[in-house]
Amino acid sequence: MKDILFFSPINPKTLKDEFIERFESLILSGHFKPGEYVPSERELGEMFGVSRPVVHDGLRTLEHRGLVTIESRKGVKVNDYRKEGSIELLLSILNYSGMNLAPSFFDSLLEMRILFEVEAAGKAALRGTEQQILELEEIIKREKALTRYLPIEFSTLDYQFHLSIALASGNEIFPLLLNSFKRIYMTILERFYTDDSTIPHIITLHESLAQSIKNHDEKKAKADMEQILVYGEKQLRNQLSTASKK
């Protein structure tokens, strides 16, 4: 049954994208295992009902994401994505899981946020310009001005707040890293803010962090950011636990 689902003809409107999505599913589901060579481009074209150029282009994209390696004269080998995968693969994993991260990936994402966002806050306190601090304060004003707490609206402002801190850090990689996670980040935030009772406290925490950055207090800024992330993680886990019991 699984083979019929994955190898059924592809809608010609988005041939390459659909091929990539279905082929990723074959790998992430374990149908194709790490170290295994997949069928030839001709065979894959017949399985999916698409041309060899579509298959070839799709496999090139998958190689870029770290899911496969195209070996001359040997074929296409499935990688262990934990060793070879790029940042783009996170989006593939999220799509495959129906926009719900597996517990291990969810835990890893939260750990990663603390690792680099706490450091970003400290660097922002040391390097943030007056204009960047004004931008943080403006975002907080917009948060306070919301007359209704809709998840997507506050999530957008929350993301902008964290991105502004990454930019203020002066580290050119931090904002790029955060933007790489934007889709996952926003999905988690929108779920988190379905409980709008957390928003007033989040705004208070944002104010404290912005003030620490304005005071150029690196230690306090890092502590404030960690408090924001730990509070968010605790509340989100509570929400997920409650939802799973229903």
Image (cartoon, helix red, strand yellow):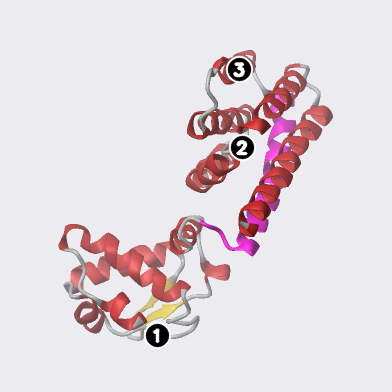
Question: Which tag, 2 or 3, sits closer to the chain's start?
Answer: 3
Q: In the rendered structure, which segment of residues is drawn in magenta?
A: 100-127
Q: Disc 1 or disc 3, which is closer to the eye? A: 3
The residue sitting at 57% across, 40% down in the picture is 189
Q: Nearer the viewer, residue 100 or 161?
A: 100
Which residue is outermost to the front? 246
Spot occupied by residue 94 in the image (x, y as percentages of width and height)? 49, 58
| Residue at disc 2, secondary structure | loop
Question: Which tag, 1 or 3, sits closer to the chain's start?
Answer: 1
Spot occupied by residue 100 in the image (x, y as percentages of width and height)? 52, 57
Task: Report the amino acid beneath label 1.
Answer: Tyr
Q: Nearer the viewer, residue 146 or 14?
A: 146
Residue at which label 2 appears: 195
Spot occupied by residue 95 in the image (x, y as percentages of width and height)? 44, 59
Examine the image and state in which quarter residue 78 appears. bottom left
Residue at which label 1 appears: 37
On screen, residue 126 above or below 114: above
Crowding around mark 3 (Cα neighbors within 10 Å: few <14, some 14 to 19, many 20+) is some
Q: Is residue 97 magenta?
A: no
User: Where does the N terminus fall, quadrant-wise?
Assistant: bottom left
Task: Report the amino acid beneath label 2.
Answer: Asp
Whether residue 31 sits left or right of residue 197 in the image: it is left
On screen, residue 126 above or below 73: above
On screen, residue 101 above or below 205: below
| Residue at disc 3, secondary structure | helix
| Residue at disc 1, secondary structure | loop
Does residue 29 appear in this view? yes
Q: Is residue 110 magenta?
A: yes
User: Which label sits on residue 144?
Assistant: 3
